[in-house]
């Protein structure tokens, strides 16, 4: 089931994860803004929820990939 994740290069995934997490750089990264909105309870618009998933998905993939590397050792 996770075989496709095992084929992802970690360095490329790291670059994509950092860029997605921090983009746009000014005035505030979307991921931080959406997490703040979530903690305040104002994350209600579908576009904001999609934005949260889009900007956090590469980070989630990176964490899964690193866990799978650690488990295979």
Image: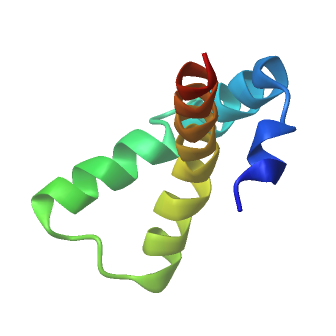
The residue sitting at 25% across, 58% down in the picture is 37
Question: Residue 54 sits in which quadrant?
Answer: bottom right
The residue sitting at 75% across, 45% down in the picture is 5
For the C terminus, the quadrant is: top right
The x, y position of residue 13, in whole percent, is: 75, 30
Question: Residue 70 sits in which quadrant?
Answer: top right
For the N terminus, the quadrant is: bottom right
Left or right of 11: which side holds 48?
left
Total tally of numbered discs in the picture: 0
Which one is nearer the viewer's eye here, 62 or 18? Answer: 62
The residue sitting at 87% across, 38% down in the picture is 7
Task: Tell me if I can see residue 24 in this picture.
Answer: no
Above or below residue 51? Residue 2 is: above
The x, y position of residue 3, in whole percent, is: 79, 50
The x, y position of residue 58, in whole percent, is: 64, 44
The residue sitting at 52% across, 62% down in the picture is 53
Which one is nearer the viewer's eye here, 44 or 62? Answer: 62
Outermost residue, front direction?
73
Above or below residue 38? Residue 72 is: above
The x, y position of residue 16, in whole percent, is: 75, 33
Task: Tell me if I can see residue 65 in this picture.
Answer: yes
Which one is nearer the viewer's eye here, 10 or 35? Answer: 10
């Amino acid at each position: 089931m996770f075989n496709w994740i095992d084929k992802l290069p970690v360095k490329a995934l790291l670059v994509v994860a950092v860029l997605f997490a921090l983009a746009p750089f000014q005035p505030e990264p979307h991921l931080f803004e959406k997490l703040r909105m979530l903690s305040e309870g104002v994350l209600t618009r579908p576009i904001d929820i999609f934005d949260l998933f889009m900007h956090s998905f590469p980070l989630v993939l990176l964490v899964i990939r690193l866990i799978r590397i650690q488990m295979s050792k």
